[in-house]
Amino acid sequence: MRNVVRRIAVLAAGALAACAVFEVGLRPLYWLPYVHHPRLGSILPAGTVARYCREGCGTSRWADDGARHATPLDPARPAILAVGDSFTEALMTDDALVYPQRLEAGLDGGWQVVNVGRSGASPADYIALAPLYAERYAPRWTVIQLRADDLERDACDPSKTHFARRAEGGVEAVEVPPRPSRTSQLLAPLRRRFALVNLATLRLREFRAAASTEPPLFRATARAPAEGTPAASYPIEAELEALAAAYGGRVTFLFLPDFDPHDVATPGATELRFTGACLAHAWSCVDLRSAFPQLAARRESPYGFPNSTFNTGHMNDAGHAAAAALLHEEIARLRTLALL
Amino acid sequence: MLFSSPRFFVFLVVVLAVLALRLRLRGKLDFLLVASCLFYAAWDYRYLALLLGVSAINHHCGLRIHGADDPRVRRRWLAVSVIASLGTLAYFKYTGFLLHNLNHVLALAGLSVPVLHVLLPAGVSFYTFKTMSYTIDIYRRELLPSRTLMHYSTYVTFFPELIAGPIVRASVFLPQMDREIGPTVDRLRVGASIFLLGLTKKLLIADRVALAADPVFTRPELFSTPAVWLGVLAYTIQIYCDFSGYSDMAVGTAKMIGYDLPRNFRMPYLSANVAEFWRRWHITLSTWLRDYLYIPLGGNRRGGVRTYGNLAVTMLLGGLWHGASWNFVLWGGLHGVALAVHRAQGELRGGRALLPPVLAVPVTFVFVMLCWVPFRSPDWATTRVILGKLFGLAGPGADFVPVAVVLCAAALVLAHAIGVPLDRSVARGSMPAWLGRALGALGFELRSDPIAGWYVVLGASTFAGAFVVSTWLLLLFFFAPTGSSPFIYFQF
């Protein structure tokens, strides 16, 4: 009996030591002490210095709850708001390299660009949260980052805040408040304290998701990809109108299309509709495609990282630099027109 | 049901739990047959009938060959068996390819035949080779036939090696079927150790470097010369870790059940020449080709030119065995030519090697790596672009340096640095003191058996051992990609 207890103690001590080593080793790679916000969902609280090193490696400083900014926010300085999803949040990219921070660095006149990008957020979220952002940051202008997917499937996903068509035409945002699971609530204190627990809960979620969509063993049972709703059936123009209205028309839309270095010129169907709506409404719009010829000439892709896959995934340094340069030109144009 | 998928772990636990019950051996073997059929039917139940049909024909042929004294009758039944196995393989694997190529020829006369799109049954290349070796061994009077069809079908359908080998010969497996099976503490420890090693190769290395290899083989024109070299290196690492990882998982699973499966790899990338590579790579296939193709063709008994021809034919067919494509034929042909050249220079130099090992190993490695280009490329056009890129002949591209390739290459070098002294220890029959002390401190054991070769059995009886095993499991948990991809050799 004593021998069994001794062996269990040795096993537990070895396992605990391994966990301790992992905790120390993980912190420089993954440190995201999320807290729950009733409207924003999981956010990084003010004062956090976060580290994310899975796809790319980046350190981010959070000046306010859910707002990324390398230095403390100054209410006296005029603000530009950068709204978007994980492409704007850009946890995998260092502060100085993300497009909102690059844009701020290039602007004179004391502007600060507040990055409120949030992973998993949808365009309908941006509308639902516009009053909250207005109250917090009183932005003079807002940059809204969009991809084709955001305006299509994501915009109408009923599991999160989404668009619904109004009977009288147009769309409205239907808010779905974020609800943390019971387990998530129970583990929250541990997740905020230990990188190991934090990453373990994320991994378990990923494993669960993978198990539910386990790839078939062989080709025979390979399910054909579900027929997507054709881009033409999404109310893209109405979505853009609603977004522009939510921010008082003082917006620049930043569109991020897929990159094909051998065909930098041909836009996709949703992108064409986006461009058409921009022209029709004389909105301020920036399409990253304008930077594609230079990127292709430099043999760079705006997406993908050395520790993930080339030209797949989120924007890398080159992508953020290109987006910031285009936005800078657009802001300069707006200022010439005395709109900003 | 991938070996690396949660569903397989549930399946395995159920199988082991039933085999742990106090049942008669016959009952356990019958259950194993049912479990293997369920495993196979998880893919497509329709091809289960084909698998069992091929088994039944070959079992019957085996009995007839054994029971006949007349050489002509024996030959006739052997022919029936080989035609049934090879016919199955040829129809399902090569019909589309043959008709496609026939259309190229007929197109010259303005004719064409409809191309059949036949779905490849999983594991057909592996189980037909098993069934053929069974009847050929009986014909050669090297093996007694299996007593019952159930017994034989359990061997043919044994799920750990059904889909992608190792190609276990009946002479290795059937004698083991008389012993008691079912999990014991020691079997579980041994099996889990080998399985864990395979799982690590698959998830932490193969699936990681695949992210770097796939884009290069999908659109090579996008990448620069160094990036393409890294992509090809990534695939070189991927295919080794994917296939040897699968083999380890198969061997580990079989060990948990109570069977020994043969070793399929022995650090092949450390080979000093192509002949040695084939003694270390996919060992069960290369020995199969040697015993059932190369030697019957005449082997090296009929003079120089014929020997080189036999080598080339064996490797061409070995290439074609992997898949119905000219790219596989090219891959096999390159290896065949290299084997012939190696043999010729050996004869000219009286058996002395052309290069010292310090140069021969990297040269062989680069040759093998370049041969993977046609093997992995989807078509000849891609092969040409990649080869052009590798030698700076196909224009510029993106300089993408995938970190995973660098890390995984370093991990492989480290693993080989540990593996080489262990391998030598087993070969010499004695272990250096430092290695014995290191294994002892960890509570690990180096074991070997005549079939599976050597392997390290993990343990958690010491603090250091518990620490290493826990760290290993945490590494898998935190860094393995979640959406595991199917094993490469499943398509063959």
Image (cartoon, coloured by chain):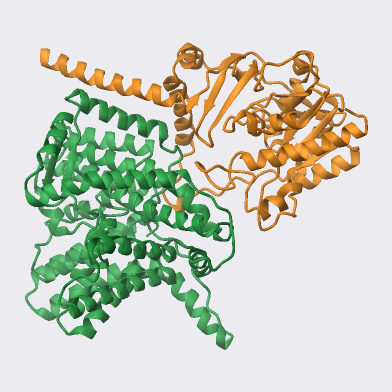
Chain colours: A orange, B green
Q: Quadrant of the N terminus of chain A?
A: top left
The residue at the point 45 percent across, 64 percent down is B118
Determine the image quadrant of residue B58: bottom left
Q: Position of residue B254 (x, y in %)?
A: 21, 44
Closer to the camera, A151 or B50?
Answer: A151
In the image, B377: left or right of B131? Answer: right
Q: Is residue B17 above or below residue A189?
A: below
Q: Is residue B266 above or below residue A313?
A: below
Determine the image quadrant of residue A20: top left
Q: Is residue A177 above or below residue B118?
A: above
Q: Can residue A265 be seen in the rendering of this structure?
A: yes
Q: Can residue B177 be seen in the rendering of this structure?
A: no
Q: In the displayed image of the protein, which residue is found farthest to the right?
A: A337
Q: Position of residue B82 (x, y in %)?
A: 24, 71
Closer to the camera, A304 or B190?
Answer: A304
Determine the image quadrant of residue A276: top right
The residue at the point 43 percent across, 69 percent down is B327
Closer to the camera, A102 or B263?
Answer: A102
In the image, B408: left or right of B37? Answer: right
Number of on-image labels = 0
Q: Quadrant of the C terminus of chain A?
A: top right
Q: Position of residue A218 (x, y in %)?
A: 42, 51
Q: Position of residue A121 (x, y in %)?
A: 66, 27
Closer to the camera, B39 or A217?
Answer: A217
